Image (tube, rainbow, N blue to C red):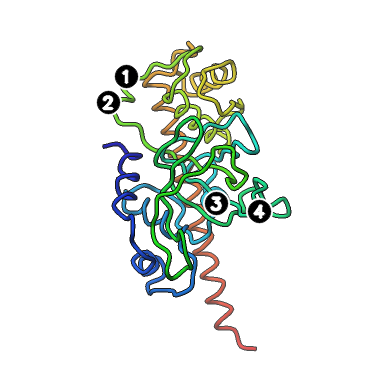
Amino acid sequence: MNEIEKVISIAKEQIGNSAEKYRKWYYGYNAQDVAWCAVFVSWLFSQAGIDMVKTDGAGCFAREGNGIYGVWYESEYSDRSTTPKVGDIVTFVWNYAGRYYQNDKYYSDHVGIVYAVDDSYIYTIEGNAGASNDTSTVKYKSYSRTSGAINGYFRPNYKVSESEENTMELQKGNKNNFVLAYKSLLIQAKTLGIISQKVDESNSFGDGTYKATIEIQKKFNLDVDGIAGVQTITALRNAINNELTQIKKSKSDRNIVLDEVITTVGKMKV
């Protein structure tokens, strides 16, 4: 079972559950009358053992995690080139305008996980669905893919299995989900400053992807052929992981300094 299947399987097992289990996990107690859709999604990824923003805010998965834990895609209502995928974290706006233009693009009212997609609809599993914050449950839902209620999709960096990765050899002209996963890594590398080449968000291996692949290969002294094989993808993934480790360490160091400042100030006489 891969990571996407694991998240979806866990989510399906929660259908019909109420808030208490998830709010106690997040807050340490049953925070009554508090919305819990984002808490539910955070819980899913924690149970699946996947690194993800832990939050009780619907828009925070993309706001805090874009380029670190995954990649953000606008809704099809706003960008018809977007193609939702199983495993996406989907966010909603109840003004049915695609987003709240007075807020940042991630600002959302609700969030769920996509468990199926067809040509016309997305099918979701959502916590805090169907009633008040205290009487709602985990439910199956569905929406037109072009609905203005959908704000966008945050696509986590799900790991590809070793057997799948070892057989990958992606090249110009390919169009499949493996290319999309590879390009998600390239987009993340661009966000982190590892590469400068921009790529689009389709599942096609075009000129931008080719140039980005060449850039990775030159940067890490690999054979420069523009083909994304095991060595290229491994080098890219390692570079991203190293950069994320440095970011997390920097945040930890800043928190230590802040704690020291707070302690010092607390000891000062006024």
Q: Residues within 10 Å of mark 4 (few under 14, many from 20)?
A: few
Q: Is 109 on the left-hand or right-hand side of 159?
A: right
Q: Are marks 3 and 4 in contact (CB under 8 Å)?
A: no
Where is residue 164 shown, x and y percent of the image? 31, 25
Circle 2/circle 4 CB separation < 8 Å: no
The residue under the point 43% across, 17% down is 170
> In front of the other: label 3 or label 4?
4
Name the residue that disc number 1 marks.
167
Q: Which residue is mark 2?
A: 163
Label 2: which secondary element: helix
Where is residue 254 shown, x and y percent of the image?
54, 60
Measure how far apart labels 2 and 4 are at the Cα level.
44 Å
The label on residue 95 is 4
Marked residue nearer the N-terminal end (3 or 2): 3
At 48% from the left and 19% from the top, the residue drawn is 217
Q: Earlier in the sequence, mark 2 or mark 4?
A: 4
Q: Position of residue 228 (x, y in %)?
A: 44, 18
- Residues marked 2 and 1 touching at CB (< 8 Å): yes
Q: Quadrant of residue 169?
A: top left
Q: Residue 138: x and y, percent?
A: 38, 57
The residues tagged by marks 3 and 2 sit, at their Cα atoms, a distance apart of 31 Å
As shown in the figure, which amino acid type bears the numbered disc 4? Asn
**Residue pointed to by mark 3:** 64
Camera-nearest residue between 92 and 240: 92
| Amino acid type at image mark 3 | Glu
* Quarter placement of the C terminus: bottom right
